[in-house]
Image (cartoon, helix red, strand yellow):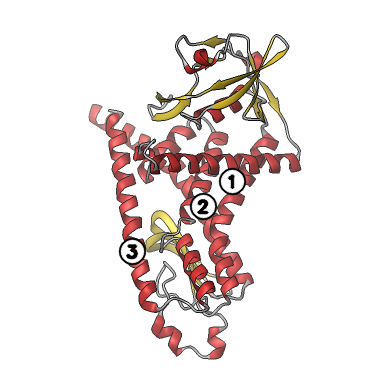
């Protein structure tokens, strides 16, 4: 019975990670591919297949326009295949294209005007950003934003805050000219700005003082055992539930705040990548599907709102990843189109083929590296 209980417990834990992971990833992938699909339809390009996942089809159906909507066995992405494509990566089928007559070319992605092709490709990442804005906006309208005043209750001795001159009782009013409405807003700026000098305005007994503080890069462990390297000042807030209030938003305000939240994720990701490229940050924070699955399960235990917020953050990440100028990704196609606009004609088939091969190699290396990071991360958790 002990062995059986352990097996059942392991199965339950696996489902606890798998179901939230599939929910989050399927939502993000579906919206990304839907962006490609809708703009293609509006542009008169025929869509042969809309697939969630790769590999053998599990189930599907054909719509009245001849598009095969399918769910495949490997739920780690998806694709939209256009008329004239050789494969799911939108590689042109040169032989088929050469055999097309004038009427057939009208529905082919390859023969669509350059601006239409660029719009179709860009629509996927844009849809991801719009999804994130929509999710954040709905959460702000339905739940509101928790607000705790940015008051310093304690300053750790020898910390960056102590060196900058913070004292207990200070209220943080602004950082680098940006108004601070809550302690969490201050934390977000500080955590994403390690080793960067910040100009902090504090209210001390009714008098505004200007302090310069440089958050130190430190490793922190969250409630799920995940380690993060973030900027820390060394100040704390001892808030009680009575100190927390919820700020509600109307529809327009919520959309604006959702856009700001989305931009914050974009800026934070860009800042991390910049520090990684310059050697000031390690690449071991890059995660793959294993870490996404674990994080989804962990976050799901906090409730649906937390899980849907994770979906918004992942949606932004997927949008940014696809905009990288790497062949095989949307950004790589947009790079080809930019070169076509400059040259006045598309790159030759051989150049595009070699570009796709290089892009595939880069994407595979990134996936292997991210998966290795995931394995190392899990092993460190014991």
Q: Quadrant of the C terminus?
A: top left
Residue 37 placement (x, y as % from top left): 56, 65
Q: Residues within 10 Å of mark 1 (few under 14, many from 20)?
A: many
Helix, strand or loop under label 1:
helix
Pinpoint residue 267: horizontal percent, then vertical percent.
54, 41
Q: Is residue 7 visible?
A: no
The first of marks 1 and 2 along the sequence is 1
**Left or right of 302, for residue 148:** right
Q: CA distance from mark 3 to mark 2?
A: 21 Å
Eyeballing the image, is 369 above or below 39?
Answer: above
Disc 1 designates what residue? 132
Q: What residue sits 56% from the left and 80% below the top?
A: 107
Q: Earlier in the sequence, mark 1 or mark 3?
A: 1
Question: Which quadrant holds residue 218?
Answer: top left
For residue 319, side relative to residue 349 (left or right)? right
* Labels 3 & 2 near each other (Cβ < 8 A): no
Look at 66% across and 32% down and name the residue there. 143
**Residue drawn at 44 percent across, 88 percent down:** 98
On screen, 135 above or below 95?
A: above
């Amino acid at each position: 019975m002990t062995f059986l209980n352990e097996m059942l417990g392991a199965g339950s834990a696996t489902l606890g990670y798998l179901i939230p992971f599939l929910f989050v990833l399927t939502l993000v992938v579906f919206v990304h591919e839907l962006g490609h699909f809708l703009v293609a339809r509006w542009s008169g390009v025929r869509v042969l297949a809309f697939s969630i996942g790769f590999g053998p089809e599990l189930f599907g159906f054909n719509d009245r326009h001849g598009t095969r909507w399918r769910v495949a066995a490997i739920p780690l992405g998806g694709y939209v295949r256009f008329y004239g494509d050789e494969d799911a990566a939108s590689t042109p089928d040169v032989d088929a294209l050469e055999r097309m007559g004038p009427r057939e070319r009208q529905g082919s992605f390859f023969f669509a005007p350059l601006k239409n092709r660029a719009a179709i490709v860009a629509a996927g990442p844009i849809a991801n950003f719009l999804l994130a804005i929509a999710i954040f906006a709905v959460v702000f309208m339905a739940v509101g934003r928790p607000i705790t005043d940015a008051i310093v209750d304690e300053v750790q001795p020898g910390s960056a805050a102590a060196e900058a001159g913070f004292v207990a009782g200070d209220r943080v009013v602004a950082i680098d000219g940006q108004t601070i409405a809550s302690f969490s807003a201050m934390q977000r700026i500080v955590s994403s700005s390690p080793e960067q000098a910040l100009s902090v305005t504090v209210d001390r007994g009714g008098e505004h003082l200007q302090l310069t503080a440089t958050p130190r890069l430190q490793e922190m462990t969250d409630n799920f055992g995940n380690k993060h390297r973030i900027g820390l000042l060394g100040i704390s807030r001892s808030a009680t539930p009575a100190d927390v209030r919820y700020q509600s938003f109307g529809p327009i305000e919520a959309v604006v705040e959702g856009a700001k939240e989305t931009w914050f994720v974009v800026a934070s990701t860009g800042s991390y990548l910049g520090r990684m490229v310059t050697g000031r940050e390690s690449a071991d924070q890059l995660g793959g599907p294993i870490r996404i699955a674990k994080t989804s399960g962990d976050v799901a235990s906090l409730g649906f709102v937390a899980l849907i917020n994770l979906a918004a953050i992942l949606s932004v990440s997927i949008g940014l990843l696809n905009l990288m100028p790497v062949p095989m990704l949307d950004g790589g196609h947009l790079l080809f189109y930019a070169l076509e606009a400059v040259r006045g004609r598309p790159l030759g088939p051989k150049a595009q083929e070699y570009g796709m091969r290089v892009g595939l190699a880069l994407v595979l290396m990134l996936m292997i590296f991210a998966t290795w990071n995931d394995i190392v991360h899990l092993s460190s958790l014991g």
